[in-house]
Image (cartoon, grey):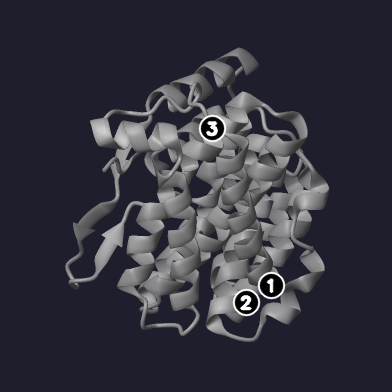
């Protein structure tokens, strides 16, 4: 079974962000292309950590948003989760984590579409959700808010600031023995990204967006395995795993994907053939999953 994903490795993303400052527009464009061309193969199960917990290669919300930016996905503000809803999610660790991930995806979507005022508002939503998870230090250190305001019109700078915050939150979760929160948050970010991509594609039928969407759906298998590692930590995970397993099964049932898996061949997502029925099944499952997360 094919379990490979071409995704921008986090190190490459960090190098790309750091290298942009002070370069010409032509150099920036070339570096962007180099980052995409240097994509690495990520296999589903990663290595076993020293504490005997299994770790997985999950990208960040920024990485997924960057993939969709390169595919030409447009900005549709109505697709974002209402940033005023943060307080209603302060009911359980699961709700806090899943919506922290959703707001992280919305923030990344705004950033890469150069919607900087909206980015500021969604950064605030992430900070509020993060406070419920004990992440105040990550958002308050190094004068993050002031630096974000100062550089709000500079995409390279604000993306770097947000990237640093995400790194700090991951470190804090690990230090606090809450690695499962990182996985749950990513499941939220991935679901939000899939929802946005599906809706954007339905409006403009951009084949590159569809290709990126299908490519990122490969992550469903990795997310399932990561969630199962922590399935006993939160009661809601059983339902979440089942929902993503359904999406994964629908993806694997796409005729072109199924054929490639049977032949153990790599899939060219930019030319893959998908029927309306196949895509509609995934669309409804993603929408249902996302609705349950935000309501």
- Tell me the element at label 3: loop
Q: Position of residue 12 (x, y in %)?
A: 40, 35
- For residue 97, above or below residue 189: below
Q: Between disc 3 and disc 1, whose residue precedes?
A: 1
Spatial CA span between label 2 and label 3? 42 Å
Q: Position of residue 214 (x, y in %)?
A: 50, 38
Is label 2 in contact with label 3 (beta carbons under 8 Å)?
no
Q: Which residue is mark 3?
A: 274
- For residue 276, above or below residue 235: above
Spatial CA span between label 1 and label 2? 5 Å
Is label 1 in contact with label 2 (beta carbons under 8 Å)?
yes
Q: Which quarter of the rendering shows the C terminus? A: bottom right
- For residue 134, above or below residue 153: below
249 and 173: which is toward the camera: 249
The answer to which quarter of the image holds residue 10 is top left
Q: Which of the two marks, 2 or 3, is nearer to us in this view?
A: 3
Q: Which residue is mark 2?
A: 131
Asked whether residue 82 appears in the rendered view, the answer is yes
- Tell me the element at label 1: helix
Is label 3 in contact with label 1 (beta carbons under 8 Å)?
no
The residue drawn where x is 77% and y is 72% is 85
Residue neighbourhood size for the residue with mark 2, other residues' Cα within 10 Å, grouped as few (<14), some (14–19), many (≥20): some
The residue drawn where x is 60% and y is 77% is 95
> Going by the image, does 195 lie left or right of 248?
right
Q: Which quarter of the rendering shows the N terminus? A: top left
Q: How many marks?
A: 3
Q: Position of residue 44 (x, y in %)?
A: 29, 50
């Amino acid at each position: 079974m094919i379990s490979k994903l071409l995704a921008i490795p986090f190190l490459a993303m960090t190098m790309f962000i750091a290298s942009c400052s002070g370069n010409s527009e032509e150099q920036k464009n070339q570096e962007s292309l180099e980052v995409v061309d240097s994509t690495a193969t990520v296999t589903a199960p990663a290595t076993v950590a020293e504490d005997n917990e299994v770790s997985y290669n999950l990208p960040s919300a920024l990485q997924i948003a960057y993939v969709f930016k390169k595919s030409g996905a447009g900005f549709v503000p109505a697709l974002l989760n209402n940033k005023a809803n943060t307080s209603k999610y302060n009911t359980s660790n699961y709700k806090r984590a899943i919506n922290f991930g959703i707001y992280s995806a919305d923030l990344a979507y705004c950033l890469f579409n150069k919607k900087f005022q909206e980015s500021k508002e969604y950064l605030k939503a992430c900070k509020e959700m993060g406070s419920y998870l004990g992440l105040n230090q990550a958002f308050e250190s190094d004068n993050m808010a002031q630096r974000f305001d100062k550089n709000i019109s500079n995409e390279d700078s604000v993306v770097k600031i947000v990237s640093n915050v995400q790194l700090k939150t991951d470190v804090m979760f690990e230090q606090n023995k809450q690695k499962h929160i990182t996985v749950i948050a990513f499941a939220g970010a991935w679901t939000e990204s899939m929802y946005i991509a599906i809706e954007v594609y339905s409006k403009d039928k951009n084949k590159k967006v569809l290709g990126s969407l299908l490519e990122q759906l490969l992550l469903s298998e990795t997310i399932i395995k990561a969630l199962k590692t922590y399935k006993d930590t939160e009661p809601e995970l059983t339902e979440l795993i089942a929902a993503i397993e359904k999406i994964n099964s629908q993806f694997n049932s796409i005729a072109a994907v199924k054929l490639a898996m049977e032949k153990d061949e790599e899939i060219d997502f930019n030319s893959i053939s998908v029927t309306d029925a196949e895509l509609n099944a995934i669309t409804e499952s993603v929408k249902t999953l996302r609705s349950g997360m935000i309501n």
